[in-house]
Amino acid sequence: MTSKSAAAAARATVYGYPRQGRGRELKKAIEGYWKGRVDADALRATAAELRRANWRQLAEAGIQEVPTGDFSYYDHVLDTSVMVGAIPGRHRASVEADALDGYFAMARGTQDVAPLEMTKWFDTNYHYLVPELGPDTVFTADSAKQVAELREALALGLTARPVLVGPVTYLLLAKPAPGVAADFDPLTLLDRLLPVYAEVLSDLRAAGAEWVQLDEPALVQDRTPAELNAATRAYRDLGALTDRPKLLVASYFDRLGDALPVLAKAPVEGLALDFTEAAAANLDALAAVGGLPGKRLIAGVVNGRNIWVNDLTKSLATLGTLLGLADRVDVAASCSLLHVPLDATTERDIEPQILRWLAFARQKTAEIVTLAKGLAQGTGAITGELAANRAALASRANSPITRDPAVRTRVGAVTDTDARRSQPYGERAAAQRAHLGLPLLPTTTIGSFPQTAELRVARADLRAGHIDTAGYEERIKAEIQEVISFQEKTGLDVLVHGEAERNDMVQYFAEQLTGYLATQHGWVQSYGTRYVRPPILAGDISRPEPMTVRWTTYAQSLTARPVKGMLTGPVTMLAWSFVRDDQPLGDTARQVALALRDEVNDLETAGTSVIQVDEPALRETLPLRAADRPGYLAWATEAFRLTTAGVRPDTQIHTHMCYAEFGDIVQAIDDLDADVISLEAARSHMQVARELAAHGYPREAGPGVYDIHSPRVPSADEAAALLRKGLEAIPAERLWVNPDCGLKTRGWPETRASLDNLVAAAHAVRAELPTVD
């Protein structure tokens, strides 16, 4: 096929779409089902209508091939576990009794049965449920969901492409099931899994699928020869099937590297590659293997993870280069649009001039359609769109919002000394113990307490003008009083004010810093029914005035016990925002760090002796390729130290991380030079404590003993058992007792019971410790 015919065949498509609905209808229906207010049929009806609305919207925008199977009640990896029959033994009875309730039990747990472990989806802020596999795992095909959703789309007269997590990525994301040897490699189950995928593919073909997409993002990471051989075998076997649709293997989030030749040679009909951040590397690699003769290439030239308008001219140039490298070139976003909000036009509080710079999911589909049209028909067919795009890009580049000379001068004056504490940890620890007077195994929480309906109503009333600022603040004071009183009665050693005034741990700060934009409807799924509104980091960052000092000092005035000041760290402020793409991330991180440094210093001046700077995103933002990690970790750890290094030796600096794999960043955790770190550990059975010990981590740590992402209440015995596991790795004088994460999403009854049990567990284990004379 000539380049001209390849261009003429260009088709617009996407890999996935936001699930929640315009008004987060899915969240409301699912949570209503959990509370018994919505029955199963009503929940299914809501889900079906959301799917239909998404497909119609995509089709009306000009998307010529819509995805199916990407919709999920909770998580697409959990859906894959159901599809292949990988149900943990402890959940089989509930799944057999009621498939929907069993599904949610795997995700959330029950009072008697623990959920699946949850962790980050590659380097995004989306969380997936980790498959649990072992040598005795028996896979069985259940394609009902995938087939039903395909038929729904086909019934609307649409061209549809089912999307599945690929078999290699599924196994690489899995972990050994509880009780299975830690060195068990789930990838050894590949030959057992492939026949199940073959059956699902056959079912989808029978249901009318022409193409099926198999997502293999794990192949953009560094992979061993054995793992690459597994990918070779997987797609050799699936490609050799006679009863199957055409296969499109999709990669995203980074360059495909050594896996590209493997997939280029595989007997599959198409590949999807990321041509945004990985454009140059994937272009070079594709040319090096001689392109994809006879195959379909889907080019992800629109960034599916950020919200800035696409440079259409640049993307068209990339697409033009690709025309000679494949039989057919289609246009898409770089990944599923799950990672961006739904529609920028709903944002009424953002200036129209700035709104032109933004592209949410609906706007990105329009960009994809425009690029496909330009590729197929030439730039003359899209002259109006190109002119408007150039104007939007120029508006942003020339805006005074993006540059503040004072901020840039301050960043330029930073020295190495600014990012170092004045004394080494040993001397600081002695000063802090003398100052704080805490017992062995001190108890605390991570920061937030339940955000009650009353608090949400108070915020809504303030926005609507139903109450004034004074009335709102009285409600916040009353909530802080209740939180402090509860913690004192429960017996916690280091208290928090509960963060009643905060809508979100990033948005709250973003709304008080220059350079940030806040959205009203920019919801993005984090996990399950948990949605966040990432702020938009559009310009240079500074702090006009203190952000947390007032409420922290008010809480401290209510108790003689230390109250932690609570801040979100610079890396997390970047990772959980839509960050600017017009300067290096390290430069932006230093700007945020200096603004937060001012807040840390003001907290200390106001009498706060314990300050926690949360960095849950440190591991999440770790580049997927090892070669890219040292540079990232250098600026990320420096930014944290720049935030915290200006305090006295007797001020105790805490940090917190959750729901990620920590083993490969233990040295970076050490490099933060925090005095205390708290980490998720309950679902992973204290794995992180063992990793810290193996590294020789010298500071204090609080591996969590209470999984807050499940509604179940851990018993005191259960928490004590986890605490004893922690003591096997971390000595008592350096071990803290705390939940895995903040308690914002939990209800008060379970929070009270769980923290009572946590404190009881700490007292019980303290009593077991040898007496020190």
Image (tube, rainbow, N blue to C red):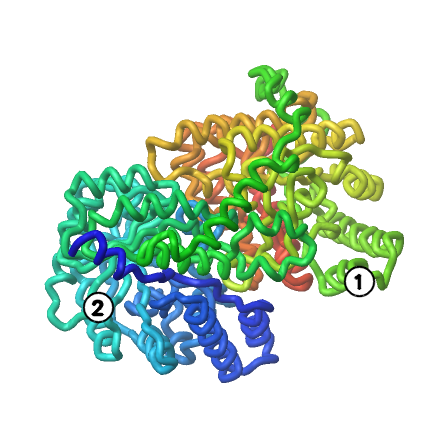
Farthest residue, direction front: 380
Q: Residue 696 falls in which quadrant of the image?
A: top left
Is the residue marked by circle 1 packed among few (<14), some (14-19), or many (20+) residues within 10 Å?
Answer: few
Would residue 8 be seen by someone viewing this image from the given angle?
yes
Tell me residue 185's x, y (percent). Answer: 25, 49
Residue 440 placement (x, y as % from top left)? 62, 36
Considering depth in this image, is 376 or 208 the residue closer to the camera? 376
Q: In this view, does 218 lie to the left or right of 344?
A: left
Contact between labelled residues 1 and 2, with CB atoms less than 8 Å apart: no
The residue mark sitting in front, 2 or 1, is 1
**Is tag 2's residue or tag 1's residue first in the polypeptide sequence?**
2
Secondary structure at badge 2 equals: helix
At label 2, the amino acid type is: Val
- Compared with residue 186, is residue 279 higher up or lower down, i.e. above or below? above
The foreground one among 755 and 47 is: 47
Residue in view at x 14 percent, y 73 percent = 243
What's the residue at 87%, 56% (across, down)? 468
Image quadrant assignment for residue 241? bottom left
Residue occupying image coordinates x 39% and y 66%: 63
- Give the percent coordinates (x, y) of residue 93: 38, 75
Query: Which sits in the foreground, 52 or 182?
Result: 52
Query: Please, what is the three-letter code of the amino acid marked with disc 1?
Result: Ala
Which residue is found at the position 20% from the left and 48% from the top?
A: 325
Q: Residue 594, percent across and down?
A: 64, 28
Mark linked to residue 196: 2
Quadrant where the image shows the C terminus: top right
Q: In this view, does 440 lie above or below 576?
A: above
